[in-house]
Image: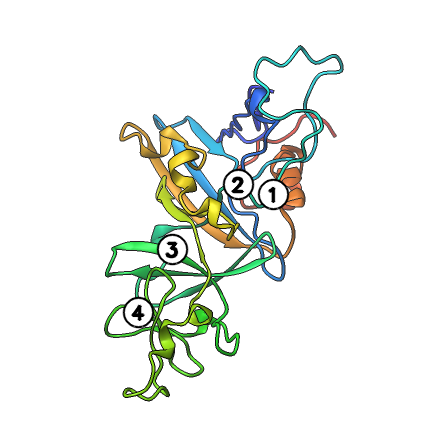
Amino acid sequence: MEALGASSVPSFHIRTILDKTKLRRPMFLNLHSNPTPSSTFSLVYKKQSKFKVFNTMSSTVSTEPTNPPEPVLETHSQGEKFDWYSQWYPIMPIWDLDKRRPHAKKVIGLDVVVWWDRNEETWKVFDDRCPHRLAPLSEGRIDQWGRLQCVYHGWCFNGSGDCKFIPQANPDGPPVHTAKKACVAVYPSTVQNNIVWFWPNLDPRYKDILVEKKPPYIPEIDDPSYASLMGNRDIPYGYEILIENLMDPAHLPYAHHGILEILPSKNR
């Protein structure tokens, strides 16, 4: 399907770009799960009346024809299963993140904390559990040295997940903060298209995954000839329902009655 036009909405022309060859391997932007899932969307347009809404979710409904052509590119064998935890996932647009505090997010069932490491000048994504008593690090703070500090007992961590300070430890005693068990699990992360992405797998072999595989790239977002609008919204349901709703323009005059300008129908 090359484009889906909302013909009943003359003042807001929507085109959803779908590449059939890419539907074989879904590209995900924000698969946030319950209790309050989030969806990130990017609205990119060129000229005044032309809009492109790039879906940030992938549909589980097949759009292949009855007799699909022979695939040109196939990166997975038929017997190989798709590994949901060996992919890049977006978390949040950077302008929706406050550098002064940590942020709690849930992505594909994983609780993570996103925070700005001013010492390395980059966004970090940690497991949202302090190794001490498993308190959520997202409820903590950024201390005066730019470290992530746990709200429970004040343990402090740098951008590599290393514990740098335990307030209750004897300063003249052994350096217990250097123990491996005192470290926080750190997920590989990066910023692309002004979105924070992370790789939800703590296996050491994925530590440098960014060198081998980068997140899906949308060139129009970084193209200065386009204007873009990006946002994040918490929704109380999964991405399957959202994508089905976005692909259904017939509901607009009724579910959004009075919000969008709709041409009067000649059919009674």
The N terminus lies in quadrant: top right
Separation of residues labelled 4 and 1 (CA atoms): 31 Å
Does label 2 or label 4 sit earlier along the sequence?
Answer: 2
Position of 88 relative to 99 (above/below) = above
Q: Quadrant of residue 137?
A: bottom left
Does label 4 or label 3 sit earlier along the sequence?
Answer: 3
**Residue 84 marker:** 1
Place of residue 101 in the rendered image (x, y in percent of width and height, measured from the top left): 35, 68
* 2 and 1 marks in contact (CB < 8 Å): yes
Question: Would you say 200 lies left or right of 62 here?
Answer: left
Does label 1 or label 3 sit earlier along the sequence?
Answer: 1
Q: Nearer the viewer, mark 3 or mark 2?
A: 2
Place of residue 123 in the rendered image (x, y in percent of width and height, measured from the top left): 34, 55
Q: Secondary structure at mark 1?
A: loop
The C terminus lies in quadrant: top right
Q: Residues within 10 Å of mark 2 (few under 14, many from 20)?
A: many
Separation of residues labelled 4 and 3 (CA atoms): 21 Å
Q: Which residue is mark 3?
A: 96
Position of 57 relative to 201 (above/below) = above
Does label 3 or label 2 sit earlier along the sequence?
Answer: 2
Query: Residue at horizontal 60%, vertical 43%?
Result: 84
**Residue 87 marker:** 2
Q: Which residue is mark 4?
A: 147
Place of residue 58 in the rendered image (x, y in percent of width and height, measured from the top left): 59, 36
Q: Residues within 10 Å of mark 4 (few under 14, many from 20)?
A: many
Q: Secondary structure at mark 2?
A: loop
Separation of residues labelled 3 and 2 (CA atoms): 23 Å
Identify which amino acid the numbered label 1 is placed on: Trp
Q: Quadrant of residue 246?
A: top right
Query: Residue at horizontal 29%, vertical 74%?
Result: 143
